[in-house]
Image: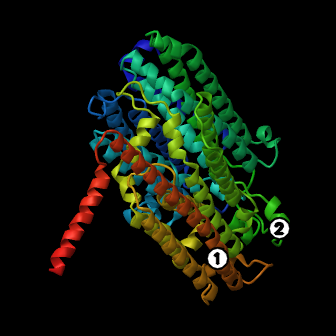
């Protein structure tokens, strides 16, 4: 493929990407036995058509998903804006191309739903496929639901991308597309392994970064018809994201291999391990190509030469295509570890039944949650980098705020990856400790850490209004309509309190115990709801609306009462929450589930009020400081008025009010 056709006909690179991915996937499907393996005697076989069409539809999903996410990422962050803040012509073209790619994604998802159903039945497609059967599979079976949800999100992203002209619409479409990547992860190879929590979270940590990385590069390569100055700026912006994605992909790949392979010898001794090595080699080659981008292609772009960038981009994109084809083949290649678990407890928990609870086990029996751990470490790293940047330029930042932020991040890791995570699904009382850490203690510390203030001070403003940067995006988010709604004190209180009762008095708690996706959503909601509430009442960061301190005090007292009422309700309840889960789990040690539930209520009622006392203390301290600042402001205004020989405006208004009251009193006496 020569350089000139790539510049004139970007679709040639897209076609080459599809062909390379399909060729590599087909060869490795044959090599790994994912397409030609015969069904065991006595079991039905859907035939070779399904054996090839199913991975082909999965390949179409992956390639179109990569293109969709990459084009939307380029429209949001790698394209200039026009003078009115709308999408520029190149951003508009990327949005329309993303709409087309997302439509293909939706179609291939539909095909995948159909042929996954055929594969499960093991019969020819003509005997299985009907509208009723497909709809039933897509709405009632988890595997079908995940593929169907992915397609629905892709179709929604296509509609948004096709009808939006502003960056906000592009961001909405990007979030929808990223959401569409998630559902299939929870029903793939990783979800069936014994350590499915590690495997699924590790795969999420792999899929999302690699899609952003590959998609962003593809978007820059096939939509590079802007000026070389704009392209150089886009590549410079994309480079740090690519490095972060490379790091996440490498670490998550090692984790996935450790979970799926019993020993290092299986890397070379099994077909699954061999295909995994091929994928790792492709990623290493991509990293080398990325280094060439930084050393040769970017300086050439800055100098006004587009050729070196396009040549390296073509090579890197085709390597990504090979890696995608390898991933599809890997998803159909039998893994060394079987899909069936040994006992019911392992099937429910994702790990064997641990020994009885002790302090030592809580401290040592860690169950790492890679996704949340990576997020907490990244938050701590970015915060530390911001503090370091301020110190470098001679600005001060309170050590207490840094300490609170870092401790808050550490508590998130402890709550989700220590022995608390291993014993949380076994004991409601341990889950309640996790709940308090994630929804009260950690959010309090994070809100007092002032991350938004730090970001606004540490991030440099953009020098070109056509290219808003992270600081400008943060300011837009702070002043958006959504922020004003969420920071309404009533809304923040309802989200914070209502979620407690919905979690424990509906089926959501049992769903979070049975589904890792629901568990991750629960953790995210606990942290988000807690941070939002405490940002409103004691946060040191700027907020879209100012709330008087008396109202903040009322909010804290209401939340304290409702939280205590939840604890008392759990203590006195005679109905076992998530009863089916505890019966199926049949824990052989420890307190009975109902007794443990009452212990959890006692923890929520007693220890849950301690953080509220801290919040009240912080709020009163902020209130007194605000009064002191207001008093000093008034004194300075009065001093200036006296020095200028005039009466202070506020003092004059106060005197007029007193005079009016005196006149009114005299009229009443008469």
Query: Residue 347, position in %: x, y?
Result: 70, 66
Residue located 80% across and 49% down the image: 262
Q: Is residue 433 above or below residue 319?
A: below
Which coloring applies here?
A: rainbow
Asked whether 292 or 103 is in front, the reply is 292
Going by the image, does 470 lie left or right of 371? left
Label 2 crowd (10 A; few <14 / some 14-19 / many >=20)? few
Query: Residue 115, position in %: x, y?
Result: 48, 53
Residue located 41% across and 12% down the image: 4
Q: Which residue is mark 2?
A: 359
Furthest residue to the right? 360
Asked whether 455 or 11 is in front, the reply is 455
Asked whether 463 or 72 is in front, the reply is 463
Secondary structure under tag 1 reads: helix
Place residue 167 in its image quadrant: top left
Q: Is residue 375 above or below residue 3?
A: below
**Disc number for residue 581:** 1
Q: Are marks 2 and 1 in contact (CB under 8 Å)?
A: no
Distance, label 2 to label 1, CA atoms, is 25 Å
Place residue 252 in its image quadrant: top right
Query: Residue 392, position in %: x, y?
Result: 62, 28
Q: Is residue 277 above or below residue 584?
A: above
Residue 117 shows in the view: no
Query: Residue 107, position in %: x, y?
Result: 39, 47
Q: Is residue 348 above or below residue 153?
A: below
């Amino acid at each position: 493929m020569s350089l000139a056709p790539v510049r004139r006909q970007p679709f040639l690179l897209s076609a080459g990407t599809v062909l390379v991915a399909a060729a590599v996937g087909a060869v490795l499907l044959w090599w790994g036995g994912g397409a030609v393996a015969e069904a065991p005697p006595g079991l039905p076989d859907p035939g070779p058509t399904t054996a090839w069409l199913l991975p082909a539809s999965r390949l179409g999903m992956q390639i179109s998903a990569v293109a969709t996410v990459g084009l939307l990422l380029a429209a949001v962050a790698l394209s200039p804006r026009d003078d009115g803040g709308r999408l520029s012509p190149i951003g508009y073209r990327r949005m329309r191309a993303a709409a087309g790619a997302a439509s293909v994604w939706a179609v291939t998802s539909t095909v995948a739903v159909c042929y996954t159903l055929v594969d499960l039945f093991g019969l020819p497609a003509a005997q299985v496929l009907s509208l009723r059967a497909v709809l039933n599979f897509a709405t009632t079976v988890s595997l079908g639901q995940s593929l169907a949800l992915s397609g629905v999100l892709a179709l929604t992203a296509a509609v948004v991308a096709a009808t939006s002209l502003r960056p906000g619409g592009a961001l909405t479409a990007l979030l929808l597309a990223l959401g569409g990547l998630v559902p299939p992860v929870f029903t793939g190879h990783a979800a069936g392994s014994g350590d499915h929590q590690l495997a699924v979270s590790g795969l999420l940590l792999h899929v999302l970064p690699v899609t952003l990385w590959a998609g962003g590069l593809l978007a820059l390569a096939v939509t590079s018809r802007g000026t070389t100055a704009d392209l150089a700026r886009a590549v410079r912006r994309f480079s740090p994201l690519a490095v972060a994605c490379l790091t996440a992909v490498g670490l998550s790949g090692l984790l996935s291999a450790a979970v799926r392979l019993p020993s290092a010898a299986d890397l070379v001794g099994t077909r699954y391990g061999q295909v995994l090595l091929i994928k790792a080699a492709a990623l290493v080659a991509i990293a080398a190509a990325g280094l060439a981008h930084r050393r040769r292609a970017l300086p050439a772009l800055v100098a006004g030469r587009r050729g070196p960038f396009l040549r390296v981009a073509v090579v890197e994109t085709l390597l990504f295509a090979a890696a995608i084809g390898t991933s599809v083949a890997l998803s159909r290649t039998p893994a060394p570890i079987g899909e069936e678990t040994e006992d019911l407890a392992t099937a429910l928990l994702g790990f064997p039944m641990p020994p009885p609870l002790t302090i030592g086990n809580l401290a040592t029996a860690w169950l790492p949650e890679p996704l949340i751990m990576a997020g907490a470490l990244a938050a701590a790293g970015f915060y530390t980098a911001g503090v370091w940047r301020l110190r470098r330029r001679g600005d001060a930042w309170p050590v207490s705020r840094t300490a609170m932020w870092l401790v808050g991040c550490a508590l998130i890791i402890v709550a989700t990856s220590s022995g608390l995570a291993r014993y949380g699904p076994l004991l409601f009382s341990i889950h309640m400790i996790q709940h308090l850490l994630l929804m009260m203690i950690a959010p309090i510390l994070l809100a007092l850490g002032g991350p938004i203030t730090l970001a606004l001070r540490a991030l440099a403003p953009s020098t070109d209004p056509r290219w808003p940067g992270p600081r400008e995006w943060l300011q837009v988010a702070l002043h958006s309509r959504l922020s004003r709604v969420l920071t309404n004190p009533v809304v923040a209180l309802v989200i914070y309190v209502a979620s407690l009762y919905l979690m424990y008095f509906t089926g959501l708690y049992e769903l979070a115990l049975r589904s890792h996706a629901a568990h991750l959503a629960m953790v995210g909601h606990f942290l988000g709801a807690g941070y939002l509430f405490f940002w409103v009442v004691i946060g040191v960061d700027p907020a879209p609306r100012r709330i008087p301190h008396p109202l903040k005090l009322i909010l804290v007292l209401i939340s304290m009462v409702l939280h205590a009422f939840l604890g008392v309700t759990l203590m006195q309840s005679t109905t076992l929450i998530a009863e089916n889960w505890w019966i199926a789990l049949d824990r052989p040690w420890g307190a009975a589930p109902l007794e443990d539930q009452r212990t959890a209520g006692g923890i929520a009622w007693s220890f849950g009020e301690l953080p509220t006392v801290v919040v009240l203390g912080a709020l009163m301290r902020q209130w007194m400081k605000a009064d002191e600042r207001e008093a000093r402001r008034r004194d300075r205004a009065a001093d200036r008025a006296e020095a200028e020989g005039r009466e202070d405006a506020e003092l004059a208004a106060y005197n007029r009010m007193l005079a009016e009251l005196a006149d009114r009193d005299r009229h009443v006496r008469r």
